[in-house]
Amino acid sequence: MITIIAAIGLNNELGKDNDLVWHLPNDFKRFKNLTTGHHIIMGRKTFESFPKPLPNRTHIVISRNKNYLVPQGVLLAFDMSQALALANGDNQPFVIGGGEIYRLGMEWADCLEITHIDGSFDCDTYFPKIEADLWKCVSEVPHPKDERHDYAFKYCTYQKIKNQL
């Protein structure tokens, strides 16, 4: 099962200047819990936004640059097909961004783990539209705004709707 994981604003906003524009500690914990022990697939800019590779995950970076140098232990792919082949032994690799990688991953994904944030943001990167005829929300868990979270949000798990032939 290939899973896309993202946090998005009301207008599908992802971030600005290769960074998040919100701080949701519980969403970070959920991201860590879901992705630990798995392959995480990302674009070069997303990878470069990390101070160092995330622990206990196998990083696969997609880049068009055939000469792009990645640190030891990080895998390099040149397209989504190759990235998924590198994650072949993982029963649930995660696509973690950015915007272009999400767009490419939508056709491959079986599951979306989306944090819907109750806010609109000034962003330059957006998540692809979640088409209601292709995806069904199978789980929704609300989280209120509180002293640690400036915005209310909800975790939604979507499953791809399989065509019945």
Image: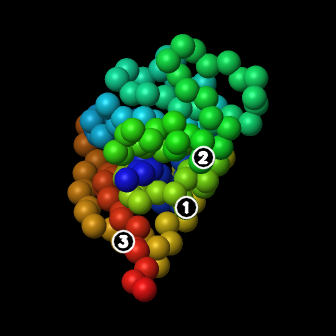
The residue identified by callout 2 is 80
Q: Residue at x 52, y 44 (%)?
A: 84
The residue identified by callout 3 is 136
Q: Considering depth in this image, is 95 or 150 the residue closer to the camera?
A: 95
Q: Position of residue 111 (x, y in %)?
A: 39, 58
* Circle 2: residue type: Met
* Mark 1 Cα-neighbour bin, 10 Å: few <14, some 14–19, many ≥20: few
Is residue 28 at least partly visible in the picture? no
Colour scheme used in the picture? rainbow
Q: Quadrant of residue 157?
A: bottom left
* Circle 3: residue type: Lys
Q: Residue at x 61, y 19 (%)?
A: 70
Question: In the rendered structure, which disc, 1 or 3, sits on the residue that comes first in sequence?
Answer: 1
Q: Is residue 143 left or right of residue 44?
A: left
Q: Height in image: 57 above or below 138?
A: above
Helix, strand or loop under label 3: strand
Q: Quadrant of residue 16?
A: top right
The residue identified by callout 1 is 107
Is residue 147 at least partly visible in the picture? yes
The Cα atoms of the two marked residues, 3 and 2, are separated by 23 Å
Q: Height in image: 123 above or below 48?
A: below
